[in-house]
Amino acid sequence: MMIKVNYDEINTELRALHSGIFASECHGFICGYFCASDSVTSTAWRDYFLAGIDDDTELETCSAILSQLADQVCEEILSDEITFELFLPDDESSIIERSKALAEWSAGFVSGLGIGGAGDKPKLKDECDEFIKDMVSISRIETSLEEDEDAEGALFEIVEYIRIGVIMLHQEWNHPGQDVEKPEVLH
């Protein structure tokens, strides 16, 4: 088992590069790219995040951490034990910060699907199509939530829906015929 990179470590590296991209969006992008392409070895996602970075040392450091993150994504999505987790701030962070990161994650996921070649994939089952539409909607989530149990519960349910949906989408495109728990459709 590999050593996992964490949210703060990725954010620190991306901030040092003044990339304007956060760990949640980066993780979402890699997940979307992997779902669409079934690969984390391509440099397309690295180019997406690190284009325009001139400092070779910083570029090499960040590229290595992102490669480790990509390997982690692959391992978690393919795991039989459903260990896949979204890269979001911890529960001690405000609901506003976590919902903003969830919107960034979802936007990254949708972008990753596109760059990974989702448009060239065969027609999906209805629940997978619905999941992708939900991801677009979640990427536009409002971040003016109140800090209360209802908001916490709603955020938890959305995160769980996405976790299962990502695994389902990856299997549908890359390993059809294998069963996965279907996420409940959110509206």
Image (tube, rainbow, N blue to C red):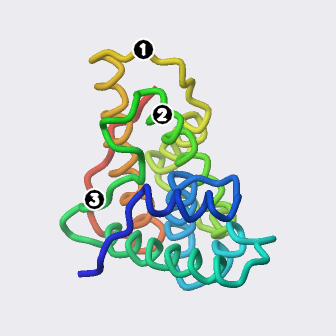
Counting from the top left corner in percent of width and height, residue 42 is at 61, 83
Q: Which is nearer the N-term, disc 3 or disc 2?
A: 2
Q: Is residue 152 left or right of residue 109?
A: left
Viewer-nearest of labels 3 and 2? 2
Q: Which mark is residue 146?
A: 1
The amino acid at mark 1 is Glu
Q: Which mark is residue 97?
A: 2
User: How far separated are the C-alphas under marks 2 and 1?
Assistant: 12 Å
Residue at (32%, 68%) from the top-left corner?
Answer: 76
The amino acid at mark 2 is Glu
Q: Which residue is mark 3?
A: 180
Q: Which mark is residue 130?
A: none
Counting from the top left corner in percent of width and height, residue 163 is at 35, 51
Looking at the image, which is closer to me, 39 or 70? 70
Q: Which is nearer the N-term, disc 2 or disc 1?
A: 2
Q: Is 96 rendered above or below residue 40?
A: above
Q: Is 116 rendered above or below residue 24?
A: below
The amino acid at mark 3 is Val
